[in-house]
Image (tube, coloured by chain):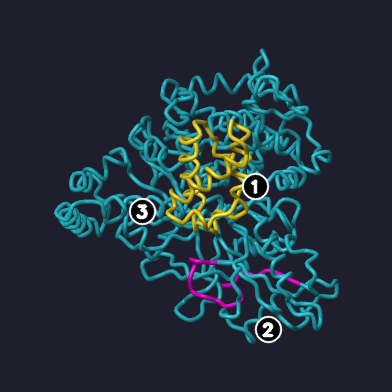
Amino acid sequence: MPTLQDTTEQILELAAAHFKVPRAQLNPDDDFFKKLGINSLQALDLLTRLEQHFHIELPDYELQGVSDFRTLAERIQSRL
Amino acid sequence: MLDLNQFNSLGETLNAALDRWLGDICLIESDRERENCRLTYRQFKEAALPLAAALQDAGLSAGTRVAILMTNQSKWLISAYAVFYCGGVLVPLDYKLPADDHLKLLAHSKAQLLVVEYHLWRAITKAEKFGELALRTVLSTEAPVNADLAGAQRWEDFCAPHPARFVPRERKDPACIVYSSGTGGRPKGCVLTHENYLEQAAAVAPIFPFWPGARYLSIIPTNHAIDFMGGFIMPFTGGGTVVHLRTLRPEYIRDAFTRYGITYMAVVPLILKNLQRGLTEKFAALSPFKRRLLNVLIATNRTLTKSKPRLGLSRRLLKDIHAAFGGSLRALLVGGAFTEPATIAFFHDLGIPIYNGYGCTEACTAITVNDQRPFRPETVGRPVRGMEIRILNPGEGGIGEVAVRSKTVMSHYLDDPEQTAETIVDGWLVTGDLGRLDESGQLQLFGRKKNMIVTEEGKNIYPEDIETAFDGLPVKESCVFAANFLWPARTMVGEQLVLIVHPEPGKGLPPIIVEEIAQRNRRLANYKRVGGYLLWERDFPLTASLKCKRGELAGEIRETLSRESVVPL
């Protein structure tokens, strides 16, 4: 199983690719709404992308109250 | 459609609906590619009555308040019907709020029972003030086997073998307490009566008729007045079907249109814009020839639908687009916040009627609806039946504050006579929105009089509720305003909040304090964040009880500083 650090790294890479921003600009503690300039629906899109990558199902509510990559990674890690 | 005049309560109305449409499908619940359940009206009743009987055993009687905290799903509606059957008062809570807010609203509403999805219940049990929660019974849905329920009982097992007893209610009795805002400061619990709902349903039914086979896609949270009407009361009284999706990813919403042949969907502007973006990207990817052809068809459709929507014609002209929306879509209803005319025009040109409305929880949803006869995207339409509108103190161009009188106006704000008296004056609901009625009787909106913003997701944000997030900053004082309240702008788009900071004398605002402001701002839910801060060097005007005189301070700021002085965060 990947470590939390691996998971975080993969999320940052996927987010960078999905929203077409350089990976180097993203950090685990970034507010992804602000950094990526996205709204809540676009964040749900990212969730779908992450589901495909990690082969898990993430209910929409896992994104509730989450706005930084690190917390998102923790939520995903607990389902791996 | 049932004749709603003959009923006194929502319980009685729903009883009649369930007995009338027995074999028709009332609910479909889908989760991604799977269909969780499909219920006829008869099955819905069979699922609800044993629950109602058990709720009565647990002490639910006339007037007992029952909170419901769930995402859009079949158990929401089944539980709500069971509560109405027993004469209870429903308190629908916003599942998107954090657990601390849920606890505050549960306490404020004095709910005695709670029906809650397991993941939301788990969050509540972990909240700091969980110990203060005083509820008689908690029912948790979909709890995993062996889960620690922290005193809750399983919804699925909560049923009694004996028949439930129907408890009649009067039209003026409260049916629901719906919170329109105010978790941080003063909660605004709108007490809505059975009459409010029955009158609203009767007024809107001619515009959005339901019949067996008509399908409504329910994606706005059911606690919101729009979905409670559009995704429960309206379809049930007409024998229609409500489709719930357990995940609201854009791709599953798109899929549901074609899979279920959706007739209506209510959306907030954010979702409408998202749909628009998706379509625009698809159009851009077409070959130049197809693109030109599409533009010709769109222009033709636009010309032919100016005076009224012509669905049959539009479906033939723009076949592929309508097929992507399932081919049965009659209208997208947009409400909850202001929608930009350009977005409405985009869909209108494709022959997909957007009925934009204007309303508020205090008036039990819709006050006006624009049925696009003729096409006028810049207005929110004419008042629905039974709704009187007055423009208070009209100034330049006839613009003034919108006031409403009708049988749909709430009874009062729960336990808050002061706010009630400010909001309902001589029988008129004072909305705080600025507008004018044009010569054809259509309402146009021009911004707000009150100090608040509404996000594109339809969330009402009151600055007072945000201020607590900045309590204890190392500054002399601070407060939050809506930017358009400080500097009135005749617009309802791009609204934002501004934090006013008055530093300690001679200390200024060093980067460390700015960073703390930014950090605290980040901790807020993304839609609640302030857009920037304003450095203010004078003392706030205070009342005798040392509260900030907001109106006065806003006036001083307006005279001294401009919008450009706001430092973005």
Identity of the residue drawn at 75% across and 43% down: B103
Residue B171 coordinates in the image, percent (x, y): 61, 41
- Which numbered disc flags the more N-terminal residue, 1 or 3? 1
Residue B12 coordinates in the image, percent (x, y): 57, 31
What residue did someone put label 1 on? B97
**Distance between the Cα atoms at labels 1 and 3?**
27 Å
Tag 2: amino acid: Glu
Residue B408 coordinates in the image, percent (x, y): 56, 51
Identity of the residue drawn at 81% across and 43% down: B129
Q: Against B273, is B566 above or below?
A: below
Task: Tell which subunit mark 3 falls on.
Answer: B
What residue did someone put label 2 on? B556
Tag 1: amino acid: Leu
Q: Which SS class for mark 3? A: helix
Q: Against B192, is A2 above or below?
A: above
- Which numbered disc flags the more N-terminal residue, 3 or 2? 3
